[in-house]
Amino acid sequence: MSQTLAIIKPDAVSAGNAGNILALLEASGFTVKALRMTSLNAEQAGAFYAVHEGRPFYDELVEFMMSGPVMPMVLEAENAVPKLREVIGATDPAEAADGTVRKLYAESKGRNAIHASDSDENAAIEIDFFFS
């Protein structure tokens, strides 16, 4: 078993889809090991997405992540990182496979409902960011 981090983003929380997303993740074989609701300030959102600093979407992403509550969670499953990436779908919901989180609940490429770690190394760093 391995762990990964997911964050239900402000768009999905405000739309009332957090429970649906959580249920889909559990139905896909993930066990929730930790979960909380929090709001990010500019320093926290900027630090979390620092890897994207300098890219055209960085400022918009930081603002978006501060726009409302988020729900970070630690998920556990076999091959958790690639499995979660498959379950959430492509960043752009128009390109996401049917039945994926983003196909079902994302508004757009920028407001895409959920974050998922992209590697085991980043999962460990991101889990520690929210759950020290």
Image (cartoon, rainbow, N blue to C red):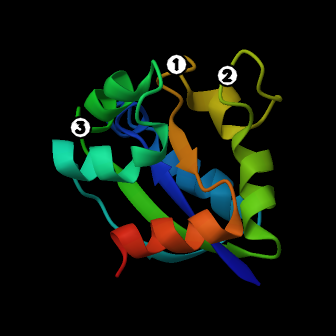
Judge by depth and name the residue closer to the eye, 53 or 19. 53
Query: Could you tell me if the residues under marks 1 and 2 are in contact, i.e. CB atoms within 8 Å?
Result: yes
Residue identified by numbered label 1: 107
**Amino acid type assigned to the residue bearing label 3 in the image:** Met
Quadrant where the image shows the N terminus: bottom right
How many residues crowd around disc 1 within 10 Å: few (fewer than 14), some, or many (20 or more)? some
Could you tell me how far apart the alpha carbons at marks 1 and 2 are, in whole angstroms?
7 Å
**Amino acid type assigned to the residue bearing label 2 in the image:** Pro
**Reading the chain from its start, which is encountered first: label 1 or label 3?**
3
How many residues crowd around disc 2 within 10 Å: few (fewer than 14), some, or many (20 or more)? many
Residue identified by numbered label 3: 66
| Of the two numbered discs 3 and 2 in the rendering, the one whose residue sits closer to the viewer | 3
Residue 102 visible within the image = yes
Residue 130 position (above or below residue 83): below
Residue 4 visible within the image = no
The total of numbered circles placed on residues is: 3
Measured as percent of width and height from the top left, residue 108 is found at: 55, 17
Name the side, left or right, on which 32 lies relative to 71.
Answer: right
**Farthest residue in the front direction?**
54
Residue identified by numbered label 2: 93
